[in-house]
Amino acid sequence: MKLKTKLRLALTFLFAVILLLGGLSAWYLKKLSQEAQGILKDNYISLEYAHHMRDVIDNNNWNEEDFRIFENNLRQQEQNLTEVGEAALTQELRAHFNAFKQTPDSSRLQLMNRQLSQITDINMQAIIRKNEQVKKTADSVYSYMVLIATICALVAFSFIINFPKTISEPIQQITDGLREISLRNYESRLGTNRSDELGEMAKAFNQMAQKLDEYEHSSLARVLFEKRRTETIINQMNDAIIGLDETNHLLFINSVSAEMLGLDASQVPGRYAPDLALKNDLLRTLLNDESSPKPLKIFVNERESYFTKEILEVKNGDQRIGKVIVLKNITPFHELDQAKTNFIATISHELKTPISSIKMSLRLLQDQRIGNLNDEQKHLLTQILEDSQRLLKITGELLDLSQVETGNIQLNFKTVQPQEMINMAVEAVRFLAEQKQIHFQIDLVPPLPAVQADLDKTVWVLMNFLSNALRHSPDHSTIQIQARLHEALHKVEISVKDEGKGIEEKYQQRIFDRYFQVPTQGQPKTGTGLGLAISKEFIETQRGSIGVESELGSGSRFWFQLPVA
């Protein structure tokens, strides 16, 4: 039977009980009321009439008023004949009263008194009899009502005991089953021996649990297989890999990272990484989220090796759920780069001497004391001189680059006034500026303290800024040179702003990379792409910072900042 049908039957039964009790109570109450009214209307009134007539007889005055009272009561008694024998006695009383009115006689009064006594006795007995009947009816009503109330109470008590249990027990079983499912116990099942809605719910629950159990076993095996395969791949990689969750607890480390950190890979998962880092300097360095452009030098396998650190954020949508630290072994590339740097330094150094000799020979050839040259010879000498000058500049930049890459930059710190550096750089490029008729606008914002810097290398950086600005500025334009103090940073900033075409935003992040040159849209490129890279190394080595601000059509502003002396 459906649960809905059970509820409807239970409520119907309770409604029928209420109607039954209400109907019986109304019927019996009406019956008792009618019987009580019969006593009051029939017998008690007859007693009143008889009482009034006996009062008249007892007074024995028999004036006109007494006859009238007796006559009225007798007439009303004749209209209220309800008991057996009461009519005959009332007729006899009427006969004696009529005779008494004709001939008053005391014997008639005695007969009338006797008749009245008999009428009184009949009504008194009727009152007693009817009272017993009413009492018997009341007792019957009480018994019936008690019986019906007891039956209804028993049935209601049975409903109270059994019906909630019928509903609550399956719900409690389903609740327990859901709790087991939440604990990943997919083998939990419910009894399905009911045919109502709760039974259908239990069947649906069992089907869900079965599907979850099948999915758990199938997906668990697949996940375990994928996990083992992933661990195998990670362990066979030459890179050190460390996985952490969002709370910095270690999830896994491969064999390379375990050997590098001196940890047991099988005991690491689940450990709090900062706790392990307290006694492990390398792990503490790796947990630092700050990225360093320089590779990490780590002593591994009894040799110095070089690694780059890469941090990969793992996200689920917008929520960060962990990160993976990857140390890529770049030792072979570092060795090749070192060999390249040494080669460049050697070749540059070897080329610088013969190029300087060529320049000296060209100047001697241009001296008129040696002899006069025709126009074509002068033109050839000029071209050779410019080519040798360009080649000497390239070799100088390559030598500077080799110093940067080997970390052998020699700095000569001293207190320098910003104006002095600006004047030296401007004088060095003034001839080129005059050729393009470009004006320098120098803005020194007071107060302007001295800086702690290497004068030669800082002037070289500023000259590089000015040379680039002159190369990309149109003729008859203005180059702004500004120096100002950043009090919050305690640094002096020197900037060079031109009126060229500007640099696209996508190239601004790479402008300081080695050998990178901004595309010139078909125009011939000049330079080697090393000037800004070397400038960046020179400034950052002096604990300064360097940058660029540019918009297409608005020119570019290159700046660097150095600490106040």
Image (spheres, grey):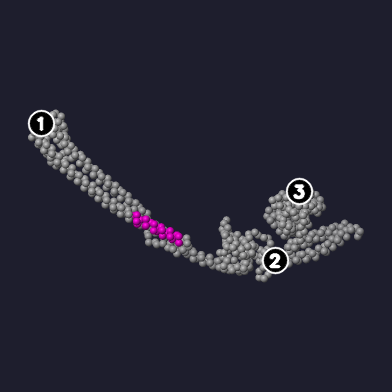
Question: Going from the N terminus, do you reach mark 2 or mark 3 first?
Answer: 2
The picture places residue 523, in percent across and down from the top left corner, at 75, 55
Q: Nearer the viewer, mark 1 or mark 2?
A: 1
What residue do we see at 87% from left, 57% from top? 378
Above or below: residue 463 compared with residue 99? below
Is 115 placed left or right of 400 in the picture? left
Which amino acid is tagged 1? Lys
Tell me, yes or no, whether the two marked residues, 1 and 2, touch with CB atoms within 8 Å: no
Identify residue for label 1: 101
What residue do we see at 16% from left, 41% from top? 123
User: What's the CA distance linking mark 2 and mark 3?
Assistant: 44 Å
Which amino acid is tagged 2? His
Identify residue for label 3: 444
Please name whichever residue, 382 or 286, is drawn nearer the observer in this view of the structure. Answer: 286
Question: Going from the N terminus, do you reach mark 1 or mark 2 first?
Answer: 1
Please name whichever residue, 478 or 80, is drawn nearer the observer in this view of the structure. Answer: 80
What residue do we see at 18% from left, 38% from top? 45
